[in-house]
Amino acid sequence: MILSIFVRQESKRVKTKELIKSTGATFTPKGLADYLTSRILSYVDREDVSVLDPACGDGELLLSMGEHLAARNIDFILNGYDLNNEYLSIAKERSYQFGELKIKLVNGDFLEVVDINHNQLALNFFGAKANGINESVDIVIANPPYVRTQILGTEQAQLLAQKFDLKGRVDLYYPFLIAMTASLKKGGIIGVITSNRYLSTKSGESVRKFLNENFEILEIVDLGDTKLFDAAVLPAIFIGRKRGNAKTISDAAKFIKIYEELNGYNGDLKPAANIYEVLDTSDSGYFNVNGKRFKKTDGVLICRTTKGYSWELLSDSESLWVNKIDNNASCLVGDLFKVRVGIKTTADKVFINDEWDKLGTEKPEVSLLKDLISQENIGRWGTTAKATLQILYPHYNKDGNKTTIDIEQFPKAKKYFEKFEARLKERKYLIDAGRKWFELWVPHNPDFWNLPKLVFPDISLSPRFYFDEGGKLVNGNCYWIVAEMKESVEKLLLIQGVSNSKLMTKYHDLVFNNKLYSGRRRYFTQYVERYPLPDCNSPISQAIIEIVKKLNTENNARKITLLEEQLEIKVAEAFGVSPIFKLD
């Protein structure tokens, strides 16, 4: 079976981290099931419907749908599918109230039986038409598994890729979306809970394209860091109506976005008993839910189809502000520089250490130990003393080419590496590539390390763009931009000033919409390369650069605060908006 990874290891609705990690199983809370059901049915005007949940688990979504349909006196048939027979047994017990003719539960692999080529389900899924079930359904309601296809193993991942024409690293919910679409009648409604990653990431571009081509998008609800699930997933709801043969012009899609407020907002808060009450109200703004502050934004979804651009979930005022920034920009970071990810050793515990001196006489040769900038020790205007990391770097540049050291010339390093030889030789991909067993997997160009560069961590609560001229190397949990020409150095300083500003932090949050739990932000290449910049040669840009130069050398905390205020004023002036001294 394509999804044989879904093990039968629990008999009741017990949610464990191990099960969620290995199977992608994330049971739907009742409140969320009822909310999704009510939103789906607001678009349904029929006297009888067939409903499908292709990964129904213990049946929470089907149960909610059945209860709502029964309350509206709508005739229905509920169809559920799951690999875990014990979950299905629970679902059957819970749905007993509807009667045997109202519900059909199948133990098996939905992705195997769906026939995407003929846009219908195989008959062996629903059984004979005598049961009153057609080959396709009116409503799909689902919370499919969240798991990368690569975790399934090579064979299963290849089967999925071949059947659903998948490329690259994708989440399992993508083939589920394709299969669910194939099972849905034209004009049918889908309501699905997935990870929200596809809304903003480069890897989600194919998902956005698929949804835009196959559905009239009705609603997007980004549930952000509301923690409605036990799994460490930021969920989103997609509701759409399947298109007919021709792409019809439809009303603009609506969106709701709700995230915990962690920027220090101290204004008025509207009380709410829970997140579902916040979702149900027509009000937007700030809410107090059990002592936590949440910000709810709503508006019209902008589905950009330009390659590299994500969907925009912005209110009218937010959209005007973002457009003003964009219109006053001269270029993007990606127009000037390539943003690179740092070194990849694929064996960090061997190569990276903050206590090399403790090895005494067994310490590798000093010439091979290089200072390392990493997530742990990078600051906004300098490095911190939290971790003095060094990396054992067995590479150098010879005649313009990256070269691996002759290990025989470095006996101490050789002895050290040999202690970990078995571990390092487990990196079969490196050996297969004709590389030496003690190399780094991604060492980059050794000459670049001595050039001026801008470094920033992948994940951070606030921007930490650090300018380095000290020849430090960059760890794989950070990204970096190198100035290969002397005249490019001031452009790096301009990028540092703009990127470290509160203005660009607000822009980042609005345009890329990629916060994780606890307010942490992701600083992917695809985002930073799209940061807008003012004209590098303008007087305002030159003023920003001079402020940044002072910040990079200043140690007095009060002076740094004053300089950062000056920076905010100049960055705002460069983009024609008001300065931001505190995020809201």
Image (spheres, helix red, strand yellow):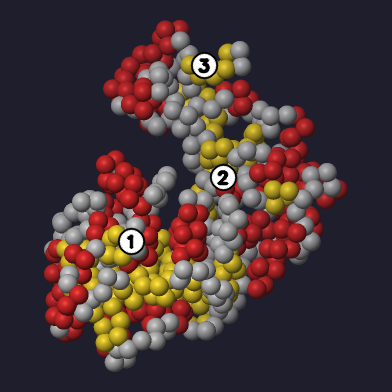
Say what amino acid the circle numbered 2 marks.
Thr
Q: Is residue 106 above or below residue 377?
A: below
Q: Measured from the top left, where is residue 550 in percent x and y?
A: 75, 42
Q: Measured from the top left, where is residue 66 in percent x and y?
A: 26, 82
Q: Which of 209 and 555 is in front in this view?
A: 209
Residue found at x 69% / y 32%: 483
Q: Which of 528 and 582 is in front in this view?
A: 528
Q: Residues within 10 Å of mark 1 (few under 14, many from 20)?
A: few
Question: Residue 86 is drawn in which quadrant?
Answer: bottom left
Q: Are marks 3 and 2 in contact (CB under 8 Å)?
A: no
Q: Residues within 10 Å of mark 2 (few under 14, many from 20)?
A: some
Residue found at x 68% / y 54%: 501
- Mark before the other along the chain sequence, 1 or 3: 1
Q: How far apart are marks 1 and 2 (CA)?
A: 39 Å
Q: Residue furthest top?
A: 409
Q: How crowded is mark 3: few (under 14 residues within 10 Å), some or many (20 or more)?
A: some
Which residue bears the numbered disc 1? 118
Q: Measured from the top left, where is residue 33 in percent x and y?
A: 33, 75
Left or right for 133, reference 405? left
